[in-house]
Amino acid sequence: MTHPALSALTIRPLHDEDADIIAAAFAAQGWNKPAAQYRRYYVEQCAGEREVLIAEINGEFAGYVTIVWQSSYHSFHEQAIPEIVDLNVLIAWRRCGIASALLDAAEMLIATRSPVAGIGVGMTADYGAAQILYVRRGYLPDGRGLASSGKTLHYGDVVILNDDVALYLVKLVGTS
């Protein structure tokens, strides 16, 4: 069953004037996501390095996702696998299907350039919902184990478990 909010959902590219709106929306829920981050994303989008998709419900910001065309994760970079990065939905709009709609749009965009989409997911419980979502959507581990700051970890490596430690997943999204 689809959530009623999805009938009012639009997904569009990031605009320059969105930076302050996005930062304020996250600040209102206690998250520090500075406008400078979204201004940088906009510059990268204009340069063709990143795509940023914004989700709005009735014209109000609800979330976003980005795609980097050249991943900083070594394996994806070598294989030219675009990476879905930084999927965020405001707490008030979670469990309404917005993240799935953003991922659908991102995967369709990736499919125009690559048959495979990549995504990394954190290993702490904070990422539990994302871990479940990605598996349910058909993402599978890339077989290289955990990575930290884009580099594969090896037996005996010692790391601090933080947002830089991720498991990278892949999904077939097209036939190009």
Image (spheres, rainbow, N blue to C red):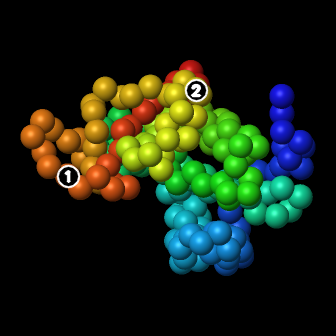
Q: Residue furthest top?
A: 175
Q: Earlier in the sequence, mark 1 or mark 2?
A: 2
Q: In x, y percent, where is residue 2?
A: 83, 33
Task: Indicate which disc residue 117 carries.
Answer: none
Separation of disc 1 and disc 2 at Cα?
Answer: 28 Å
Query: In the picture shown, does residue 62 fall above or below 104?
Result: below
Q: Residue furthest front?
A: 125
SS at circle 2? helix
Circle 1 residue = 159
Q: Is residue 69 visible?
A: no
* Residue under the image location 84 percent in, 39 percent down: 3
Circle 2 residue = 136
Q: Quadrant of the C terminus?
A: top right
Q: In x, y percent, where is residue 82?
A: 47, 42
Q: Nearer the viewer, residue 120 or 11?
A: 120
Query: In the picture shown, does residue 143 fall above or below 92?
Result: above
Q: Give the amino acid at mark 2.
A: Arg
Q: Residues within 10 Å of mark 2 (few under 14, many from 20)?
A: few
Horizontal side of 140 relative to 143 (left or right) equals right
Horizontal side of 14 relative to 11 (left or right) equals left
Q: In x, y percent, where is residue 128?
A: 49, 41
Q: Give the amino acid at mark 1.
A: Val
Q: Nearer the viewer, residue 57 or 28?
A: 28
* Residue under the image location 15 percent in, 38 percent down: 154
Residue 157: image quadrant is top left
Q: Is residue 123 visible?
A: yes
* Residue under the image location 12 percent in, 36 percent down: 155
